[in-house]
Image: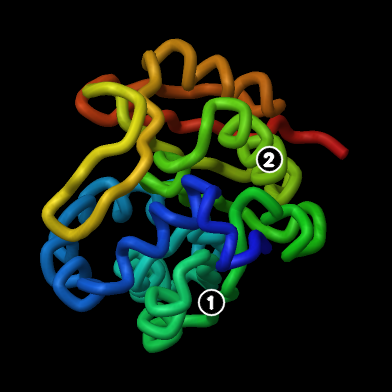
Amino acid sequence: MSDPGASDDPVVLSVAAYSDQAEQYEVTHAPKMAETAARFAASLPVPSSILDAGCGPGRDLARFIAHGHAAHGVDLNPRFVAMARRHGPTTLGDLRRVGELFPPASFDGVWAASSLVHLSESEAAAVLAQLAGLLRPGGRLYACVKSAGDTGWLDEPDGRRWYTVWEPDRFADAVAAAGLTVERVDAGVFVEVWASRPPGP
């Protein structure tokens, strides 16, 4: 995990910015992505093991569990981890080292909804490779990142955060380079990529 005192780390600074208004963030974002999460849950046999990578306060963790799956969250923000643990098991950890937190091929699905947005392109590519390694053969991944605006620091009502903005094709290529088969790309303000780990040993 990164040193929480590493004040020059844009990822640590960005994630820490959620702490001051964590409860309001939970309320604001509670209704979002319900259909997408349900679609991902339905794409896996019940019960499947799902890693909610960058789970925040646990919104989608709760959704996956409600669909009958065994979901596990991981997040770098301690406030969010405490909130997410109300819904299901959650690990405090840095996604940049997520491959060290779980054994290889531990999950049938990996859900990375807006959780790579504060990483540089090279960091995100490395995390995607680790997430691919955590998937069992035939396992599925969903990931989305910002594809509108400018890369850099953004002052938002609830804090200042770094965002990396991706071209849709470039993000899809990064997912493919991680060793996954890209099945669908939905472009918009956020580019959404649906992918799977090829079956086999």
Give residue 76's position: percent from left, percent from top: 52, 65
Q: Residue furthest bottom?
A: 86
Q: 61 left or right of 201?
A: left
Element at label 2: helix
At which x and y percent is residue 20? 26, 73
> Where is residue 27, by image quadrant?
bottom left
Rendered image: mark on residue 90? 1
Which one is in front in this view, the residue at disc 1 or the one at disc 2? 1
User: For the C terminus, which image quadrant?
Assistant: top right
Query: How many dots with numbers?
Result: 2
Q: Residue at x 67, y 20 (%)?
A: 177
Please state the horizontal and vertical placement of residue 65, each as a whole percent of the image: 41, 74
Amino acid at the residue labelled 1:
Thr
Classify mark 1: residues with Cα within 10 Å, few (<14), some (14-19) or many (20+). Answer: many
The residue under label 2 is: 132
**Does residue 201 appear in this view?**
yes
Q: Which mark is residue 16?
A: none
First in sequence: mark 1 vs mark 2? 1
Mark 2 crowdedness (10 Å alpha carbons): few <14, some 14-19, many ≥20: many
